[in-house]
Image (cartoon, rainbow, N blue to C red):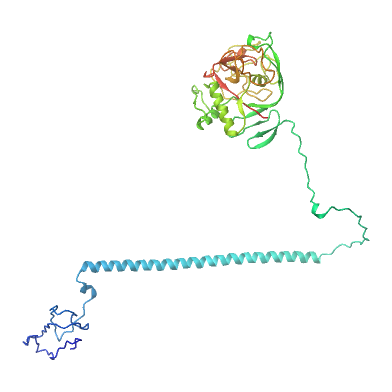
Amino acid sequence: MRLGGPLRVCQQLTPSTTVSSQGRPTPWQLVIRVRSVTARVGELQVVDTEHIVAMRKIDPLQRTQPRTWVQSLGKPWLAAVILVLLAIGHGRFEYMRWSAEDRMRQEVAAKRQADVVAADIAAAKRRTEEDIQSVISSEAEAPRAATSIAPPEPEPQQLHAPASSMAPPVAVVPSLPCEGVEAQVAIERRCLQPKDSFKDCPECPEVVVIPAGEIMMGSPSHEGGRGSNEGPQHKVAIEKQFAAGKFETTFEEWDACVLAGACKHAPNDQGWGRGRRPVINVSWEDAKEYVAWLSKKTGLKYRLLTETEWEYAARAGTNTPFSTGKTITSDEANLDGGYTYGGSGKGRYRKSTVEVGSFRPNDFDLYDMHGNVWEWVEDCWHSDYSGAPANRSAWIDRCNERSRTLRGGSWIDPPRIVRSAYRSRNIPVYRSSTVGFRVARTLD
């Protein structure tokens, strides 16, 4: 038996003879003490030291089976870990192989689809060219009507400008003159006519165009219920058109200002409802805050009506106590119908506001100029019209007191107080369930 290197076993082993390293025979057993250096791999353990490192029994008649690598490890848990790692590695390899194959299948399918689309486009292009060619051929084959050939007429000589100065003719369409007033509406310029209505933003109140004209402001001395502060009567010219709120400002419109953070006051609706009812419990200062928000939001000039503009808009071309004529009833305005005026009959007393637009408008297409709620105007209070402006501007100098003017009457008032000429006042911070306002917008 050759072990390799300098080590040799010199005695032949037989079934009946076994030799120990000390010379004593031992049946079927060989014990070897190895003191040499490196040996080749064989049936015996390989060592490279001079110490006794292994002793092994060998049966010369029985063939020795080699041990597996798992058994040679000597630690079962380590073998289990290695097996798990091998399984994981194998699974990962299989997943990567499957992913690569799937990606390749998708790329092949996409290429096939692209080839199909390209073929369809080419076929459509080919059909189009064939159709065009067939049309050209049919036109060429169609018989043409005989035409007489006339001798050419001499062309008149014309003077031409240099080529550098020639330009194609441009059609100029003259713009029609605006017979009303040209003004900005939202983001466009429009030609507005009297009684045109518009909104500058979704949350903005609807306004209507009021025509220019003149008014005999105040009331005659014989008008029933007349007060001394309604005179002397004086003529005022309204030189330019302006816009006024088609309705009294509503809770819906006011609440938009509160939601935007521009109006600080959240008024009480008295339990009557909000929405399209006129906003109440707002002061003159509150109203000024609201129109300032509209101006900032739209970039246009919103404000309160002046006292002259208000009476002009309320009368709507009339010179009677009401825009409805000499009388008015609860069927025409929200007022205390328990009282009469000018021979009218009694009517309802609703004891609250009603939704704006519940009655017919006046001839300027404005609603609720009589009753429903009092309306703040820009002017400060004067005890009469002595020295009043001769135009529509607000009268804000030489005020008799700090109060601001109110016009129109309310749901709680009798017909006498809702007349076009009737005037009242209160301090700028006054709030009441009978008081609201209406906006104006400058158009020029």
Position of residue 31 relative to residue 78, above or below, is below
* Residue 416, percent from left and from top: 62, 12
Q: Residue at x 49, y 27 (%)?
A: 264
> As drawn, is 152 to the left or to the right of 302?
right
Report whether residue 278 is seen: no
* Residue 144, percent from left and from top: 85, 63
> As drawn, is 89 to the left or to the right of 22?
right
Q: Residue at x 52, y 65 (%)?
A: 110
* Residue 196, percent from left and from top: 68, 30
How many marks on residues?
A: 0
> As drawn, is 252 to the left or to the right of 391?
left
> As drawn, is 77 to the left or to the right of 411?
left
**Res 149 → quadrant:** bottom right
* Residue 334, percent from left and from top: 59, 19
Q: Point out the residue furthest to the left here.
A: 24
User: Which quadrant of the rendered structure holds the N terminus?
Assistant: bottom left
**Res 228 → quadrant:** top right
**Res 120 → quadrant:** bottom right
Q: Residue at x 23, y 73 (%)?
A: 70
236 or 149, nearer to the observer:
236
Report whether residue 127 is seen: yes
Position of residue 98 relative to residue 402, above or below, is below
354 or 443, nearer to the observer:
443
Q: Residue at x 59, y 11 (%)?
A: 339
